[in-house]
Amino acid sequence: MLDNIPRVYIEFLAFFPLFLFAVTPLLQLIHDFINPYAHYVSYAEKTFSVFICAATVGMIGVLLYILKYVHTNGKPTLKSVIKRNIPMVFFLFVILMIIISTLINGFTEDALHGDNYRRESFFEFIGYFAVYFLSATIISDKRLKAVLLYALIYSSIPVAIVTILDSRFFNIPALDECAGASAVFHQFNHYAYYLIIVILISAVLFVKEKKPWARVLCMASFLINNVMLVINNTFGCYLACFIALVFAAVIISITEKKLNIMSVVMVGLFIAISGIMSIWEHTIFSNLFTFAGDVGNVIENPENADRAGTGRWTLWTHTMGYITEKPIFGFGVEGIKERLAFETNNVNDRPHNEFLEYAAFFGIPAAAAYICGVFSVYLSGLKNRMKLDSYEVAALAAAFAYLVSSIFGNTMYYTAPFLFIMLGIGFKRTEAEARSKRQE
């Protein structure tokens, strides 16, 4: 049976739910045009359905992938399994710590179902690593990678156009349930996480693609979503996008063994768009001056820097204090929300730093393993830099943008999976894995 199942069919099982997640913002936009007053319930139902699909169909694909690999190559040694899957070893430790933390802190309503807004139960946190990342890692067919990344690009353009029209020209009832320039997302920060991923994918594929139609599409996406990012006014994501574009120029130049001029041009184009948009939007330079002032205040007088980063410094210092109380297993899912809400007069109940969030929820060892797992994905890319295809480079750049922005943000049920999908697509296995594929 395994001999008769082509590998690409197995990969498609893992690919299909990830594709559904990629186009969910567009599907939600269509839904909101039809029924704009059921937005929150609809989006949650869509992403939950995709999660169930990924956890069943995707995991069947993963299981078949493992069985076919063993059937083709024989039973692997533990050492070879670890060597080919170092990120997942770290992520498995994170999963273990999530389970232990939940057992210790109790199966609360938040742990089992998540709160009414973020909807992240401990099952969802486990799914980020065991479902989205793991499923994405087995997709090696370049056609499937291309479809997945271009699905993100195609679906982002109408979402951005409609949001620009709604926020700057005339009211569109479909977006009435979403405050500010947030498109179909609950909050504008969340839309910015999505925007920077799409912008980085568009930038890298514009540089790397050869087909004219693909380059035109990528440039259109890059321009439209950049304009939307400026209007969105999430400075942490704006800063992350600039840093990630520089990072993308570096890794493209490394993989090509020479300076790629067009990748540098994309950085310049990002700056140019910001300058042009500043004629109408006065937030960019204001944010830059505020950011510089906040950094100076933190360095010179950290005791009086509570307002730095729109109050994030307060959240970070309080969260670090909580972490010292339970450094090993943390407080569990949403375990610090009441204390943080009290400290901020019910303004915020999350740290607005995903690394601190993992440490506060599941302990320092879990956060350290999460960081090591992410780092090992990029280390694998560095070791195999000459073998990275354009889609893997784009995925790594997009994930890097999200990771930088995560220093200032929180996980959400409909944004965090993008990170793990991109990390999975960008993960390059060792030469031993490549040899096994050729044997098939």
Image (tube, grey):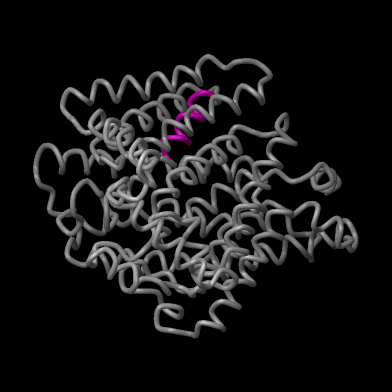
Give the main secondary structure, helix, strand or loop, of the magenta stretch.
helix
For the residue pair 308 and 389, the one nearer the viewer reads as 308
As for residue 339 lying within the magenta part, the answer is no
For the residue pair 256 and 333, the one nearer the viewer reads as 333
As for residue 203 lying within the magenta part, the answer is yes
Q: Quadrant of the N terminus?
A: bottom right
Residue displayed at 67% across by 65% down: 92
Q: Please provide percent x and percent y for residue 215.
A: 46, 25
Q: How many marks?
A: 0
Instruction: Please indicate, yes or no, whether residue 352 appears anywhere in the rendered image.
Output: yes
| Left-right relation of 170 to 300 | left
Position of 409 relative to 274 (above/below): below
Position of 237 relative to 328 (above/below): above
Instruction: Please indicate, yes or no, whether residue 190 appears anywhere in the rendered image.
Output: no
Q: Please provide percent x and percent y for residue 110.
A: 40, 78
Residue displayed at 9% across by 46% down: 171
- The magenta segment is 198-207
Q: In the picture, residue 46 is in which quadrant?
A: bottom left
Q: Please provide percent x and percent y for residue 208.
A: 55, 25
Q: In the picture, residue 166 is in which quadrant?
A: top left
Residue displayed at 15% across by 42% down: 167
For the residue pair 431 and 26, the one nearer the viewer reads as 431
Position of 388 relative to 66 (above/below): above
Residue placed furthest toward the left? 170
| Left-right relation of 433 to 173 | right
| Left-right relation of 342 to 439 | left
| Left-right relation of 259 to 245 | right
Q: Please provide percent x and percent y for residue 389.
A: 64, 33
